[in-house]
């Protein structure tokens, strides 16, 4: 088959690829095409629907936008007031059988007294260590000990982060943290504890938006619909990239020649399947991938439940679980995000099981709702294996153990899907590996960007990913610097107005 030719080729129709495509369309400087192996846009920001009509995202997806350009684009795609729901962030940590409002350290007054003492003693020790320290913490575990101390480390930070990342905190760096972990104030912690006060601390942005229809995936399908459809090609799988020949080969035998390539495939896959003229360089970057890039998989497990949303759940959005009475690190009350994430109350569904199957076998008769739903996330790595056969059962039991559901609750829908990779781990060797790999690809006009394209968790959310794609295009075509890739702390610490859809 002969090769087609474009100025810019984008691989992937997730948020990063769509960011690149949106910018290409806006700049209108040369020809471009976007290809994706999937049948539609969205990538990891997609939404599945169960047979019974329950929607589940790829884990809890909440938009914390740092960029005006990103906001311009999603509001152009979903412009009507009724396209979105706006929610207060209501988040708790399940600890010692109580719900501790997030952030944990500001609300230890709800814990048993002996745990309050452990936390405060640890924070005092940590403050002393901080005063004396002459160097920066060398890994995430040292950061936790210096910032929060032994008590909070043992009760929350270490067990929770192992459940999220599937590697111990000693194997992670701490430069990625930026704004993600609330810095504790010893004064506030002590006064809240003595005054038996609870306090939220969400900073300036205590609300979030969620699409009314189609889950998070609905946003990205709508963004894709604003682009010229003839330039988007789905069901096209990239098998190899010839760097020197500036050509991408596809599984249907066709190829596409390009001047600039924005790849949002996993960087590990790209390095494995790129051909470079210098074999020694190829070996060097393959070694960097092997030694420096770490990921975990994410199991998303959803359940649809018959009944009115119980008051104990109320307006909770997402909940964190550091302890070992549940396999999941996070649960999202997904039906609270949009009523359209569940079937309507008049839809008749049979009960598949009582949450605790020892409660008996339910009748197979289909009955009306109302319905609500929970979505849980479980991480997996070689250090933290997961049994595919039993994880659904263990998750439902975990929901009972943590009082999310009652043993007699009627489950009417299940969802379980494993995503590999799910999280790009900020491992100790990551930055050195990226510094070795990326410049070698850029020499051949290959810009590998996105959650796994550039492998930086701290700029791996939807807004960041979208901007990584848009900024890669601006760099390739206009020579402007890529702020998000190069300065994660800068973009995360401010509202970024520089790029606009109308400029
Ligand atoms: C569990 C979880 C929770 C998250 N929570 C949040 C959150 O709360 N807020 C938030 O903003 N973000 C969240 N995210 C991140 C969000 O999903 C990512 O920012 C986003 O999906 C990354 O976009 P991307 O385009 O870089 O990659 P992807 O979404 O992975 O897209 C890559 C695309 O490339 C395609 N592709 C890959 N290989 C090939 C190939 N060989 N040939 C052709 N096409 C290929 C894929 O089909 C895919 O469509 C979460 C992600 C996960 C997994």
Image (cartoon, grey):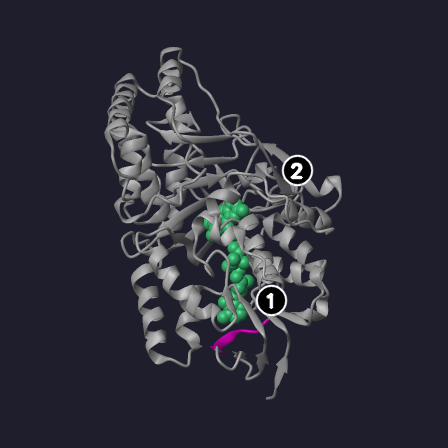
- Residue lying at the far top of the rendered structure: 195
Residue 287 picture quarter = bottom left
Q: Residue at x 29, y 17 (%)?
A: 113
Establish if 25 lies above or below 91. below
Question: Is 79 situated above or below 37?
Answer: above
The residue to which callout 2 is attached is 85
Of 273 and 108, the residue lying toward us: 273
* Magenta residues (range): 235-241
Q: Earlier in the sequence, mark 1 or mark 2?
A: 1
Q: Is residue 354 visible?
A: yes
- Under tag 2, what secondary structure? strand
The residue at which mark 1 appears reads as 39
**38 and 351: which one is in front?**
38
Q: State the residue at coordinates (50%, 60%).
A: 449
Q: Tell me how many marks there are.
A: 2
Residue 468 location in percent, x, y?
54, 55
Asked if the stretch drawn in magenta spans residue 366, the answer is no
Compared to residue 205, the image places residue 120 above or below, namely above
- Measured Cα–Cα span from mark 1 to mark 2: 27 Å
Q: Position of residue 451 (x, y in %)?
A: 48, 56
- Residue 85 drawn at (x, y percent): 66, 37
Residue 214, x across and y down, in percent = 64, 50
């Amino acid at each position: 088959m002969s090769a087609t030719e474009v100025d810019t080729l984008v691989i992937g129709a997730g948020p990063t690829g769509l960011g690149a495509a949106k910018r290409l369309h806006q700049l209108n400087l040369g020809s471009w095409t976007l290809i994706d192996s999937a049948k539609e846009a969205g990538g990891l920001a997609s939404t599945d629907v169960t047979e019974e009509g329950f929607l589940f995202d790829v884990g809890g997806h909440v938009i914390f936008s740092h960029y005006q350009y990103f906001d311009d684009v999603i509001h152009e795609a979903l412009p009507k007031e009724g396209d979105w729901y706006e929610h207060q962030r209501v988040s708790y940590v399940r600890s010692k059988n109580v719900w501790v409002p997030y952030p944990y350290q500001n609300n230890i007054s709800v814990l048993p007294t002996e745990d309050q003492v452990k936390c405060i003693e640890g924070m005092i020790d940590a403050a002393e260590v901080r005063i004396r320290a002459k160097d920066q913490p060398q890994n995430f575990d040292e950061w936790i000990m210096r910032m929060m101390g032994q008590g909070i480390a043992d009760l929350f930070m270490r067990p929770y982060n192992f459940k999220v990342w599937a590697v111990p905190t000693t194997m992670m760096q701490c430069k990625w943290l930026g704004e993600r972990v609330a810095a504790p104030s010893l004064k506030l912690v002590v006064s809240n504890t003595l005054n038996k006060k609870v306090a939220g601390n969400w900073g300036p942005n205590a609300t979030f938006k969620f699409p009314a229809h189609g889950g998070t995936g609905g946003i990205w399908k709508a963004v894709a619909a604003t682009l010229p459809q003839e330039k988007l090609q789905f069901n096209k799988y990239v098998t190899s990239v010839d760097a020197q020949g500036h050509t991408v080969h596809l599984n249907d035998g066709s190829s596409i020649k390009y001047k600039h390539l924005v790849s949002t495939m996993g960087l590990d896959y790209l390095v494995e399947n790129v051909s470079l003229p210098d074999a020694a360089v190829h070996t060097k970057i393959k070694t960097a991938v092997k030694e420096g890039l770490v990921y975990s998989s994410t199991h998303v497990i959803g359940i649809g439940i018959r009944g009115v949303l119980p008051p104990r759940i109320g307006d909770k959005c997402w909940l964190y679980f550091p302890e070992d009475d549940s396999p999941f690190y996070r649960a999202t009350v997904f039906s609270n995000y949009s009523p359209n994430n569940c079937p309507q109350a008049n839809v008749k569904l049979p009960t598949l099981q009582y949450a605790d199957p020892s409660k008996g076998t339910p009748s197979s008769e289909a009955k009306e709702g109302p319905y609500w739903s929970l979505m849980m996330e479980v991480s997996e790595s070689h250090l933290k294996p997961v049994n595919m056969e039993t994880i659904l059962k263990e998750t439902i039991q975990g929901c009972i153990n943590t009082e999310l559901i009652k043993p007699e609750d009627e489950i009417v829908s299940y969802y379980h899907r494993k995503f590999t990779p799910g999280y790009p781990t900020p491992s100790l060797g990551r930055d050195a590996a990226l510094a070795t790999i990326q410049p070698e690809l850029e020499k051949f006009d290959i810009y590998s960007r996105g959650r796994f394209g550039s492998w930086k968790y701290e700029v791996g959310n939807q807004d960041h990913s979208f901007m990584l794609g848009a900024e890669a295009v601006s760099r390739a075509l206009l020579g402007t610097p890529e702020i998000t890739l190069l300065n994660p702390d800068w973009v995360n610490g401010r509202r970024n107005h520089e790029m606009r859809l109308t400029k």
